[in-house]
Amino acid sequence: MVKVAILSQYWGQVYRGAEVFAQELSTRLPAKIYKNASAKLDPTTQVIISTNGRLDVYLAKAWCLAHHAKLIVSAQSGPGLDDRLNLYAFPDTFVALTGNQVAWAKKINPFVKTTIIPNGVDLAKFSPPISRKRSLTILNVAALEPGKRQELLIRAAAKIKNCSLILVGKGSKYDYLNSLGQQFLPSRFKILDYPHDHMPAIYQKATIFSYPTVPWESFGIVLLEAMAAGLPVVATNDPIRREIIGDAGILVDPQDTEQYSQALQKALSSNWGDKPRRQAEKFSWDSVAQKYDRLVRSYYR
């Protein structure tokens, strides 16, 4: 068996996309998780899969050269400075999460081997409820940080009568978003925070899911979790979200409040059947792990 290490800088501190990736992949390969390349890695490690960026990817590359190991970079950062630096470190393989990222990566450094392996979802853990409650609820699950743009969702949801909005997450914008939500959606707005293992039940209580993230975000595992729970999605209209959501939702420019509000209303009033669930089924963690396993083994045939 090939010995694999996964690098996840904020492992044990926060639980976002990169940490979910590390957790789910580590249990299936199997692999040991370390915070960074400066940790005391097992010297017999043969492959490092890094979700980190900046200096740490260069330290990981140096470790691999010294120990005759291979470096895989999982593009959790998305098109931008971090993944530019990751590509300039010349990993043995750069794993893009979408076709859009592959095209971008090949322009940045065409000399690095690039492949596509998306993020995934636990289809057994996240599933639709037997029946939805009748009250209309829009759900957003994300860190309360500038790039997630929840303020756009608050303003759009405020235009829809008899509809509640729930944000699940924590971050630097909590006070601002809470104040804005109470102003625009009095008595029908909440910010909550739950551990990841409580989230399946939270998705089941919502009517739709919305995610107005910046267009350069790398993926959005919460989109898969929502769709696996049967929720249609209203999200940013960009190439990455188009690949993930397919026909299981509506894509908009969330900066256009009127257009965004209309899309939310349409999603709330439409019958989506099993489209969201079927879209999520294209992205199982078991399938993702199998692809990483084949990639890891390909170095040692």
Image: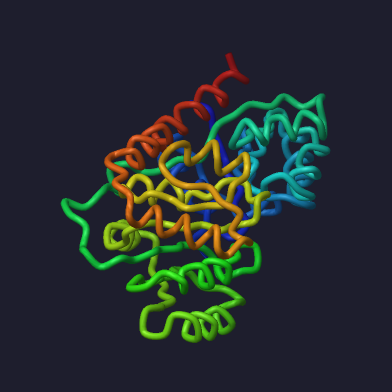
Residue 84 position within the rendered picture, expressed as x and y whole percent measured from the top left: 79, 43
246 vs 207, left or right, is right
Which color mode does the image show? rainbow
- For the C terminus, the image quarter is top right
210 is higher (above) or lower (below) than 170: above
Q: Residue at x 63, y 26 (%)?
A: 115
184 vs 90, left or right, is left
Residue 138 position within the rendered picture, expressed as x and y whole percent measured from the top left: 39, 64
30 is higher (above) or lower (below) than 111: below
197 is higher (above) or lower (below) than 286: below
Q: Residue furthest top?
A: 301
Q: Residue furthest left?
A: 130
Q: Front-most of 93 and 128? A: 128
Looking at the rendered structure, the number of numbered marks drawn on it comes to 0
Residue 103 position within the rendered picture, expressed as x and y whole percent measured from the top left: 72, 30
Q: Residue at x 61, y 61 (%)?
A: 256
Residue 92 position within the rendered picture, expressed as x and y whole percent measured from the top left: 71, 28
